[in-house]
Image (spheres, rainbow, N blue to C red):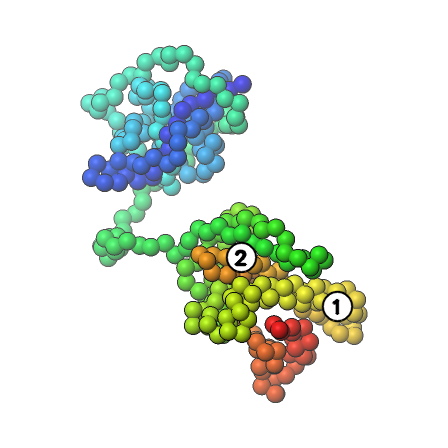
Amino acid sequence: MTDGLTVQRLSENGEGKCQKYSRIGPLTLVPFQQDLELTLENIKAACKTHFCTELECDVLAGERGPSYTDISQIKNWKVLHVRFVESLVLPTITKKQPFHQSEPLRGSPRKSVSHIPPKSVSVAKSSVVPSISLSQMLKLGKVIAPEVDIVTLKLEEFSLTNMEWLNPVEVKISLQRKPFAEGAFREAYMAKSIAGLPKGNYVLKKYKESEKEGIEMLFGSIEAHTRKSVQLNALTRNFAQNMAMEVPALEFGQTFSYNKVYFSSLNNEHVTLESHLEGTFKKYINNTGEMCVAPDDVSEISHKAETCSLHLC
């Protein structure tokens, strides 16, 4: 059984005229091992462990600061205010500042059976952030928009075994706002897995606005075209896998491998998601299944690409 400290997490930087730190989340009960000495360093270590961060912990007098530098300055033990920063140099608190020696703890802090922080405390070296140039300062007068969005998708996988769509699986990714590549019908956006998928880079593809009308005329809807493309990818992937197992390598050579492609929707648009392939891209066949290389450049791999090409019907 361990004792706990009630903690309110605050933002890294102050905001507004009063430079007030904003609250992040509700009050939290941070486990504190009962046999540990109640020091500022041990409180910081407990908070870092509980919030799972390597950032430096700063214990504040309140939502407007300043920072505590000694345990004796803490008077109110009902709520401890903390923030996490890369590194900081804490100001020296003198006797002239409005702090008082802490009173003895009245009663024991609340009980908790949560994770016990380690007894060893490692204190990071403080450093001053180097000053920035005038041009950089002027840029901060304008809002600097983030380059990525955090989005939640419900991925659907097509099962060839049962010839049906499996139940959606919810995942979370960080998605670049600008495409890094494009084809005739779709744009490709780089994404990174946050939750629900193996860690790594992924590619989200969505249709160009200029091409949607033509696709709807041919296939009835964007959803129908997207689902068919995922279904045929599953078929081609299965075909290549079986071919690699059954055909001797000396007879046919190395076969293609295909990433699994998922169907999903984002902001009412139908999209696909697949693992990102590193390397240089070279196109061997076009969307109609015809080889798109010059006659002199037709190679074995061009014929293999044509063999494994399936078209939407």
Give the mark, 2 or 1, whose residue is nearer the N terminus.
Answer: 1
Q: Which residue: 41% across, 55% down?
A: 148
- Whether residue 257 is visible, yes or no, is no
Pick whichever, 100 or 149, lies toward us: 149
Location of mark 1 (residue): 243
Location of mark 2 (residue): 264
Q: Secondary structure at mark 2?
A: strand
Mark nearer the viewer, 2 or 1: 2
**In this view, which residue lies farthest toward the bottom?**
295
Q: Which residue: 74% across, 73% down?
A: 253
- Whether residue 107 is visible, yes or no, is yes
**88 versus 312 height, above or below:** above
Residue 214: x and y in percent read 48, 74
The mark found on residue 20 in the picture is none
Pick whichever, 232 or 216, lies toward us: 216
Q: Which residue: 58% across, 63% down?
A: 227
